[in-house]
Image (cartoon, grey):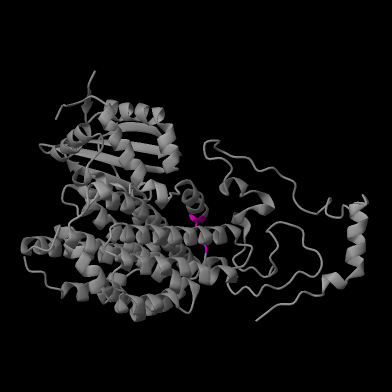
Amino acid sequence: MAVSFPSVEYFEALREKMAAHQDKFQRLGFIDTTFGVSVANNGKSRSFILEFEVYELKSVREVPSVDPRQVDFVLVGDSRVWREMIENIRRNGEADTSHDINTLAHLGEQLKIVYDSPDGHDKLYRFMESIQEFFDLTSQVDVSFNQ
Amino acid sequence: MAFYADKDYTQDQEVLEKMNQVMAGNLGLGWYDARTEKIKGRPRDLRRGLTYQDLDIGSYGYSKIPEFIRDNQSMVARGSEKVGKLPDMGYVLNRKSDVWSDNVTTLYEEAKSRRWAPAVDVPWTELDRNPLPHELEAACAQLYTFLQECALVSMDFPSRWVPLVNQDLIELKSFMCAQMLDGSRLLEAFRKRALYGGAGLGRASVSAEQGLKEWLWADTYPQGSVSINLSLAGLLLAVYRHVAAFAPSRVDRRLMGYAMQDAARQVSYGLGALRYHLRHQPAQAAAMNQYLDDTEHVILALLGSPELLEPLIIISGGGLEREQVKAGRLATAKLIRLAVREYLERLEAAGLSGRPGNSRIPQAIERIQVEA
């Protein structure tokens, strides 16, 4: 059954896949970061906080909005951008260069990275390979779009 | 310069006699009752294994390292019993706040956990299946030539200082060694990438090397750390992100993905070390500002180097056609502004307030015209 994006269920599905691919994430190393994902659509946003610890997604929850002081960074983008990324991953098995998190966020033209402290911002890059691998697990999840 | 031990041990009959006694089964066991704390280190999280953080316990912990290390100049492992005539190692960095960062043990464990091997973790043969057009491959070869120069300096900086850091700062010295390994791995990866493509290495950059040497040979560790761990690593982190975003091949994208992880750890330490330094030695803020006034120009020596700038433009635009170069110039201009903005943000976050107003770099960057 398809899980809708954005939703807690979508991230929970990725969490299950992450647990099933522990060897891959252990090879990439510790991932210790808590970050937000915010998906905007028609003036409204849905926001989530993802807490990663060691090799796992420890928790995910939906919140009314993400306070950048409470997380390392927030990935903020329009639902169109997120959908394109997800569809690209589903098509290719992984995001291509034009659709990976780094490219989408690099110059702030597709996704914006919101952060309170550069320490938090730099964690995106310290753990980039694991974060991208996490989102690439979307290739193994049936996704529908409710926005 | 040589050091000679207090005696020639082959001539010491007492040492030989004691050795014979022990080998004959007459153990002295003088060490058995060493006056040290008897506590067990245990992992708090089995998934991580036993980490340095787990050993921050009792008299062995790094939390108890004093600001001024006055009573240990030998190579004794912190917490062990000191007896006899231990040699003075001549350490010159004996003040914790000159080198420490609160995240140093986290970064050390992370560096080991997130290790990678350029030989096998980069899908080199994809360049055989999908070779780049000549101008892009040449641009890559030049870029990776330049990045080797930077990686060498990133490796040399901790190498220059680590034997001068007091041995009590074990975890910090371990991290500096991890930084050397990170630097050597990046050097290896960039060299392999340049040579795999067939365009050979490019040209060395005079302006970059002049500037890098100025940063590398800073008078003090805190100053050099700001230059190498924060300014240089921050700039390179932005370049790695940029090249990954415009990567002409999966090889380049993967390589830059790993490189950005290594650079980001270095930046995190650089920021943390400056913050710790200024928190404990606030009077040093003026000196650090003066140092940056004098040496910040190196950022332009690096960014303005044609051996970096031009390959970045070609890679960003996808080639040498007029429209490609135009697109590349626009993208690279954004990268330069991004790198400078993040550099100033980090200084501010570390406690060097007011730097954006004092720095000459933003004004210099603004003078660069990029016509659409």
Given residues B294 and B181, the one toward you in this image is B181
Given residues B278 and B165, the one toward you in this image is B165
The correct choice, above or below, for B248 with respect to B150 in the image is above
Quarter of the image where one finds residue B226 = bottom left
The correct choice, above or below, for A68 with respect to B282 in the image is above
Q: Residue at x 25, y 35 (%)?
A: A64
The correct choice, above or below, for B15 with respect to B5 in the image is above
- Viewport quadrant of the N terminus of chain B: bottom right
Task: Check residue B308 for magenta coloring.
Answer: no
Given residues A47 and A111, the one toward you in this image is A111
- Viewport quadrant of the C terminus of chain B: bottom left
Q: Is residue B35 left or right of residue B252?
A: right
Which segment is the magenta one?
A: B100-104
Q: Residue at x 41, y 65 (%)?
A: B229
Indicate the position of residue B144 as horizontal and vertical percent values.
31, 63
Q: Residue at x 20, y 54 (%)?
A: B132
Q: Is residue A33 visible?
A: yes
Indicate the position of residue B370 as horizontal and vertical percent values.
11, 69
Quarter of the image where one finds residue A93 = top left
Q: Is residue A17 left or right of residue B225?
A: left
Q: Is residue B6 left or right of residue B194?
A: right
Q: Is residue B250 visible?
A: no
The majority secondary structure of the magenta stretch comes to loop
Quarter of the image where one finds residue B84 = bottom right
Indicate the position of residue A143 as horizontal and vertical percent values.
21, 26
Residue furthest out toward the top:
A1
Q: How many marks?
A: 0
Q: Residue at x 57, y 39 (%)?
A: B44
Task: Check residue B102 for magenta coloring.
Answer: yes
